[in-house]
Each structure stands twice: as structure tokens, then as C-alpha cells.
Image (cartoon, rainbow, N blue to C red):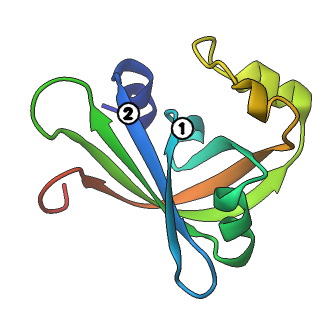
Amino acid sequence: MKLSEYFENTKGKGVLATADSNGKVDAAVYARPHFITEDRIVFITTNRLTHKNLTSNPHAVYLFLESGEGFKGKRLYLKKSGEEQNPDLIDALRRKSYAMSPADADMEEYLVYFQIDRVRPLVGNDE
């Protein structure tokens, strides 16, 4: 199964982990990635710590835990390849189930693009 199909059809929760240029780590809950190609994805971010970290360190890991029992899922090792502010594209990509909190309503939003460098299962060795 293609990775884009996996994420389109699999329910679960995701966490995007980033670090600043000094290695100080942060992790934040994120929705499933939007696929541009099979090895290029985009996330919608606000102007918070994740975005700040990615300006000084382009590397990140996205951990996805499938819904249900057990520990099934994926780890995507990523490298930032670009970003843009495009409200129309952000609105087009945003999934209908997403509800922005009132506190975030005025936050700047970015599309942050990543190259997928490596895919690993959630638990265990490489696939």
C-alpha cells in the first residue's frame, strides 16, 4: 500500500517532534500529513514553537499511532524543504474535522513542506 493511501485510510493520532538548533526538543499533536507526492508532505502549522524550531533545525519526526489496540503505526523521518503562507491553499487542505480553537484563530499559519527521508514502523525494526 502506498504511504499516501495508508494515511488517507488509517485513523489514529500523530505527534510531530522537532528540536531547535541547540537540540532542545519539543513535541506537538498534529493531524495526518497532506501528501504532495509519495515522498513529499506538508503540514499546516501556526507560529508557535514547532514552526520556530523548524526555522533553525530542518529535521523532524512524525510519529503516528493507529487507533485500536496494540502499537501499530509509522514513524516518518523528515527534512523541511520549504514553507509558504497561502491562506487559500491552507483552507483547501484543512480537513473538515479540524476545529481551530478560539485562541488560535488569529495566529499566523504556514504550510511547511517536508521530504520524507525514512519510514519506520511505530515499534521494531525497519520495514
Q: Quadrant of the C terminus?
A: bottom left
Q: Which mark is residue 33?
A: 1
79 or 31, which lies in front? 31
Q: In the displayed structure, does residue 1 sit left or right of residue 123?
A: right
Q: In the displayed structure, does residue 53 sit left or right of residue 126?
A: right
**Between discs 2 and 1, the one toward the N terminus:** 2
Residue at position x 82%, y 29% from top? 105
Residue 108 in the image, given as x and y percentages of width and height: 87, 43
Q: Alpha-carbon neighbours of circle 2 within 10 Å: few (<14), some, or many (≥20)?
A: some
Q: Secondary structure at mark 1?
A: loop
84 or 38, which lies in front? 84
Residue at position x 23%, y 50% from top? 122
Q: Amino acid at mark 1?
A: Pro
Q: Which residue is mark 2?
A: 13
Q: Which mark is residue 5?
A: none
Q: In the displayed structure, does residue 109 sit left or right of residue 72?
A: right
Q: Residue furthest bottom?
A: 22
Q: Nearer the viewer, mark 2 or mark 1?
A: 2
Residue 50 in the image, given as x and y percentages of width and height: 64, 58
Q: Quadrant of the N terminus?
A: top left
Q: CA distance from mark 2 to mark 1?
A: 11 Å
Q: Amino acid at mark 2?
A: Lys
